[in-house]
Amino acid sequence: MIIRKFKSEDLKDVEEIEREAFKNPYPTSFILGLWILNPNCFYVAEINNKVVGYILGTFDWGNGHIVSLAVKKEFRNLGIGKRLLKTLENYFFSVGCDYIVLEVKVSNRIARLFYYKMGYRDRRLIPNYYEDGEDAILMIKKRPIAKKPLIVSLW
Ligand SMILES: CC(C)(COP(=O)(O)OP(=O)(O)OC[C@H]1O[C@@H](n2cnc3c(N)ncnc32)[C@H](O)[C@@H]1OP(=O)(O)O)[C@@H](O)C(=O)NCCC(=O)NCCS
């Protein structure tokens, strides 16, 4: 499996995965608009030349924002979501973001558990966030504190 940046030829596969994963997928114009504004924040996972997952993010007031993440059903629980998330996190932290935020449906137990395992914590409820009226939980992850360099005395 490889993780690589999104290319416009991947759009059809990404939209198919999105439709399978979410009841109200984002419009194409929204996905492409975010990609154009944030070309380093859109990655896909590929197995045998087939896209099996994607992650799309953006910058939000200097913080990283995970906008959408999904893995094709038959490829879930194999560590692909984790690798996609780590790739975008590494990028966000490497360019100086102190926080990464995301919204997740209160009822999406699997995603909430997944993000919890990846170090995200519930910050607050956002009432009526989704089109169907469901509330979101805002989850947040802080940039890990860099380890202090080990100073070895030569004397
Ligand atoms: C959430 C999602 C992206 C996770 O992707 P994935 O590739 O299946 O997750 P991974 O295999 O990388 O799992 C990473 C960790 O999350 C945990 N996890 C994943 N699915 C889980 C489940 N069904 N139940 C409990 N824990 C789960 C894994 O146990 C793993 O922990 P570990 O490292 O300790 O083993 C995937 O379930 C998905 O596409 N869901 C539909 C779309 C969605 O809800 N997206 C998020 C909304 S913003």
Image: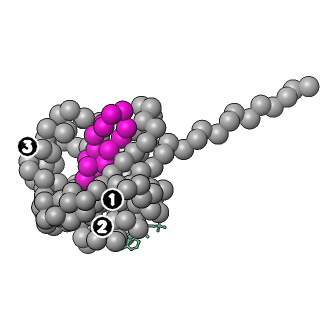
- Residue 106 is marked as 2
Q: Secondary structure at mark 2?
A: loop
- Between 7 and 22, the one lying in front of the other is 22
Q: Is residue 77 above or below residue 15?
A: below
Mark 2 vs 1, N-terminal side? 2
Does residue 147 appear in the picture of this structure?
Answer: yes
> Which mark's residue is nearer the viewer, 3 or 2?
2
Residue 38 image-quadrant placement: top left
Q: Is residue 106 magenta?
A: no
Q: Is residue 55 magenta?
A: yes
Q: Is residue 125 above or below residue 5?
A: below
The quarter of the rendered structure image containing the N terminus is: bottom left
Tell me the residue that label 1 is attached to: 125
How far is mark 3 from mark 2, CA to CA?
Answer: 26 Å
Residue 125 image-quadrant placement: bottom left
> Which mark's residue is nearer the viewer, 2 or 1?
1
